[in-house]
Image (cartoon, coloured by chain):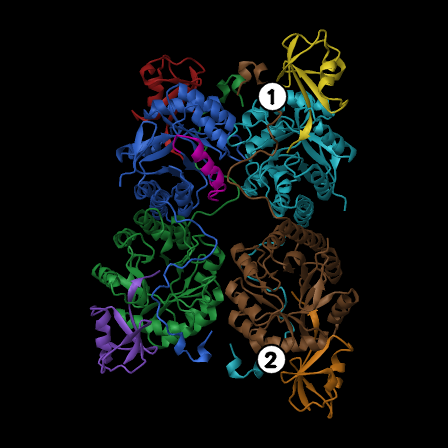
Chain colours: A purple, B orange, C red, D yellow, E brown, F cyan, G green, H blue
Amino acid sequence: MNVVVNGEPVVLEEPCSVEQVVRRVTAATEGVAVAVNGEVVRRAAWATALQPDDEVEILVATAGG
Amino acid sequence: MNVVVNGEPVVLEEPCSVEQVVRRVTAATEGVAVAVNGEVVRRAAWATALQPDDEVEILVATAGG
Amino acid sequence: MNVVVNGEPVVLEEPCSVEQVVRRVTAATEGVAVAVNGEVVRRAAWATALQPDDEVEILVATAGG
Amino acid sequence: MNVVVNGEPVVLEEPCSVEQVVRRVTAATEGVAVAVNGEVVRRAAWATALQPDDEVEILVATAGG
Amino acid sequence: MSDTWKVGSLELSSRVLLGTARYPSQAILFDALAASGTQLVTVALRRVRPTGGEGDLYRGLVERGYHLLPNTAGCFTVKEAVTTAELAREALGTNLVKLEVIADEETLLPDPEATVRAASDLVARGFEVLPYTNDDPVTARRLADVGCAAVMPLAAPIGTGLGIRNPHNLSLIRSLVDVPVIVDAGIGTASDAAIAMELGCDAVLLNTAVARSDDPVAMARAMGLAVQAGRLARRAGRAPRQHLAEASTSMSGVAAFRAYESSKEMD
Amino acid sequence: MSDTWKVGSLELSSRVLLGTARYPSQAILFDALAASGTQLVTVALRRVRPTGGEGDLYRGLVERGYHLLPNTAGCFTVKEAVTTAELAREALGTNLVKLEVIADEETLLPDPEATVRAASDLVARGFEVLPYTNDDPVTARRLADVGCAAVMPLAAPIGTGLGIRNPHNLSLIRSLVDVPVIVDAGIGTASDAAIAMELGCDAVLLNTAVARSDDPVAMARAMGLAVQAGRLARRAGRAPRQHLAEASTSMSGVAAFRAYESSKEMD
Amino acid sequence: MSDTWKVGSLELSSRVLLGTARYPSQAILFDALAASGTQLVTVALRRVRPTGGEGDLYRGLVERGYHLLPNTAGCFTVKEAVTTAELAREALGTNLVKLEVIADEETLLPDPEATVRAASDLVARGFEVLPYTNDDPVTARRLADVGCAAVMPLAAPIGTGLGIRNPHNLSLIRSLVDVPVIVDAGIGTASDAAIAMELGCDAVLLNTAVARSDDPVAMARAMGLAVQAGRLARRAGRAPRQHLAEASTSMSGVAAFRAYESSKEMD
Amino acid sequence: MSDTWKVGSLELSSRVLLGTARYPSQAILFDALAASGTQLVTVALRRVRPTGGEGDLYRGLVERGYHLLPNTAGCFTVKEAVTTAELAREALGTNLVKLEVIADEETLLPDPEATVRAASDLVARGFEVLPYTNDDPVTARRLADVGCAAVMPLAAPIGTGLGIRNPHNLSLIRSLVDVPVIVDAGIGTASDAAIAMELGCDAVLLNTAVARSDDPVAMARAMGLAVQAGRLARRAGRAPRQHLAEASTSMSGVAAFRAYESSKEMD
């Protein structure tokens, strides 16, 4: 299954949950948030399975003014 | 017929055109504009008859910054 | 003997030393300075006798900016 | 006779008047002033003869703010 | 040197726009207009008074050949402003309008969001819109983007005479829009008007600074001259500022007298 | 409106004094002088050059009817300044002198103590002394007290174009002396000149701001207009500044349209 | 003297908010935060990097007990800002958000109309909104009216360090809204921060002025002290300004020596 | 961070010098001195009063460990100032003197020429002279050249609280002399003091701004903090000013949401 994670194309084995794809990029258990196709996926819903062509944004706090 | 002209109640004999009510307050033939019930009445339409309770605004150019 | 102390005329019994006239206006033993006829009289010279018509200034530290 | 004119050493045949040395550097008949050894020599006194080692300044109006 | 400018369909040589309110008398008003050299004057639209005194103002301005710029002063909503503009066009036969949509009676500052909406509506109705706005470069650009014929940022709140509070914003606005920038409101005296032009603005709109001067006619003339001065200075290009002093008169060819000084004279 | 002023024995209508240094060419210099409207121009006294080019300047200025104000630029002592003034009087046949006694080559600022001594000496010698000074009101008053024909405080250090660094001092000086106050040095652009006049100064002496502009002739004209504008504004009397806004257009007689607005239009 | 203030549900004693960007190193960042005394620091939300370096920032800030204020930097639309705020709340577990909706990449100035719409939406979603805005009093009041927890007008465009361009607008804003006024962007050095507080603002948000100083830790300390100084001075109430001089030391009781002066000493 | 400075033979850590005049009460004076952190306070010399109240001031200051800086306030001639200084040294046993030679009772400005003569005389008599002077860089350098232990230029005329009228002159002075530069007179509020230090001055001398504040003790504390803040900021080195905006938060790693926006949301 092809998805886009933080702007990069990624191939995943189905099924793949939000949590699994998060774990691919960070071990952080807090300070992380995810959006799929522009909608926030709350932590409680990370078990949700991704669909082909989903665009996933995985964000953390970084230096800002 | 009761109408309001520039905020003052006025009693008119029916029928009364926009032009007639304008003439009651000014002889000016230019530099004058009229609104009835918040809508502009163009010069060409001054023959229009007023209706009871119409609110008429008769405006001219005055000192402004 | 007539002298002027801080702008006020004063009558003194002769002889009268600088120290004696200072004592008339203040008990302070420090923070005081004296000028006679526009010249500073150092502490060591306070035994000096005043002359008739001497003008004596007895000054202390006061509020200043 | 050696003199200095506007800072440059010059050799003159004696006798040489102020006027003669002025003429060596400018034909201007007005707008010129002369100092010899730091003293102004008024126009009326330009016939005066220079002395050896005199320092002559010949000045004119120039651009200034 | 011809130095005309265009605002909407008007081509003007004077860069002073003058308001007609708050003068000691109408005679002084007309003298002040003449002294300023203005060609474009603002008027308001108000209820005709039995006296008809206002008619004289209209005729007086038209007879003297001034272009009229009706304002929407006193409007707090888009609808009020649009209706007032339509009535002004009907009464004065001009598409020009000085758009004012004021946010509140306390600050008398323009409402940026409503001003943009009203401007956009009036442009669609065929008006040449000159909007009174704050000095926010973003709002100024938006007004230009919706098709305004000029933007008119304030120097300071209306009537305060505090002069140009934020020159940096005015130069930003000048660099961001392609339409004329006319400084409106807050000018206090002649040098303020000159500074506005030196910042690159195209014209200045004045009223209180002239009308409430002790001598409105003299102040009007001062403003006319100041605007020309500022415009010329901007075009001439100022000499660069520098932190340290530099002599104007050259030292080259300076005479040498110090040798002759008595020591006591030596500084 | 006649508005002449007197400095020493001269009566002038123009309030611009212009320096003659640092122009791209003598042709541009003469055009700039004409554009500024000045009647009194400064010159320096320097060693004649074989070329005699300077002679042209002197003749050119005299033929065009300008009054000359020779300076003592480059003098660091009383003696140098007095000798230079005497030579200038001899060469140019004028009692007027712009007295400059500079403290050091680094700051190029006037030496207040030596300037007062030189001024006092020159007054005794029959000169009409226009001293270049800093903006210290005490020194300005002392210069007036020793008989100077005017005082010429700086706006900012010579050649910096930083404009009027301390308006408060200039108004203090204006209130303390009875002779003309001429702002000399530091003016950068037209609005600076207007501000000097609005502060009550009687005239402005310029050089670098004009000569080093990209277009000296246009800048000279700008300065002439700005000085007139500032002078007129000062005499007209500005409207009072206020902290809070006040409408120029009256609300009286305003039409009532809000009743007709659809709610979505309400702001 | 306790002088805490509340923004949203937070009660703070420090009136410095500090950004975390552009420091030479994270070690210097943490030292600067400590030196400033800040309790509330801004962070951005960005894509996690494989390095996971950012995790350290988050943990570092939380471990040191700082409250976090996530921003919506880089958002140009309401939707981007709202989504970013929701993600920040999800990631950081705070309802606080520094709302930035930027109009364009050239000026980096806030879009007033979009900022008001986004603020209103975020308030409805339960956020405590601290909007970055221009210094327009009307926009500031609108932001307060839609329920923002504070308003954050700029001193000058972001990163310029030009200081407070328009003090008059900041005092107007202070007088028009009941929520805290936090000056955000444009502060250049310590005195700018003190002036912001003297104008009545409640706090200052800084980043570049500290991070890009030659010594960020020293500048952070300077800012902390300056904000306290300005706050204290505002509360103390300044002595009235006056145009003319007045002695601090009284003349009463002054000694009389002049009689003894030789004439040559007389001034 | 140790940051002491030396003036004459004194080494001080506080950079605030405080006057003792014009306070509501002596209790408030002593509290204000403590709150400011000052170590060096000015006093005048006046005729002893029968009440002897002044004795308390002297004792109060000495007991609290303050160094005393007697002034020559009220002196208009060199002789008066020198005699007053000698009496102060006799009374207070210090070689330090704040030299004031005032030109006139109207402006209360220092007489530059007489101040230089008096300073030179007092230096010869073994005093450590801190002269009150105008902001003329030439006079300041002369005072340093005759051996003053510091120079004390004014920010604005005494008691006006107008703040620093001419920052350019203060930085020139700082760059021209090697002795400490102490800004004396004219400071109005905390930010003025911070600016003085940011300009590179070494200390600030205050009186009216503190004594005539509604809350002298709070204002004294504010001044102490502001001076530290300005000093730290000067040493830290400010980030460079720039004309155009620059983001503090980086765009790198920003999320992409715009694709999901409904067109109506697009700005």
Crowd band around label 1 with a 10 angstrom C-alpha radius: few (<14), some (14–19), many (20+): many
Query: Mark 1 — on which chain does it sit?
Result: F
Does the magenta-highlighted stretch encompass residue H174?
yes
Can see residue G22? yes
Q: Residue at x 26, y 51 (%)?
A: G31
Q: Is residue E264 left or right of residue A27?
A: right
Report x, y in % for residue E59.
Answer: 77, 69
**Up-down relation of residue B24 to residue G180 (above or below):** below
Considering only order in the chain, which callout, 2 or 1, is on the residue closer to the N terminus?
A: 1
Q: Is residue E248 left or right of residue E36?
A: left
Distance Cα–Cα, label 1 vs label 2: 79 Å
Q: Residue furthest bottom?
A: B14
> Residue H26 is drawn in which quadrant?
top left
The residue nearer to you, when weighing F66 against E221, is F66
Which amino acid does the dot numbered 2 rest on?
A: Phe
Which amino acid does the dot numbered 1 rest on?
A: Glu
Question: What residue range appears in magenta?
Answer: H158-180
Q: Give the residue at mark 1.
A: F80
Crowd band around label 2 with a 10 angstrom C-alpha radius: few (<14), some (14–19), many (20+): many
Q: Give the residue at mark 2.
A: F257
The residue nearer to you, when weighing G50 against F63, is G50
Can see residue G257? no
> Residue C40 is drawn in which quadrant?
top left
> Residue H44 is drawn in which quadrant?
top left
Report x, y in % for residue C49.
Answer: 36, 12
Q: Is residue H146 left or right of residue G48?
A: right
Report x, y in % for residue G25.
Answer: 28, 53
**Up-down relation of residue H248 to residue F88 (above or below):** below
Of labels 1 and 2, the one closer to you? 1
The residue nearer to you, when weighing G64 against D61, is D61
Query: Mark 2 — on which chain does it sit?
Result: F
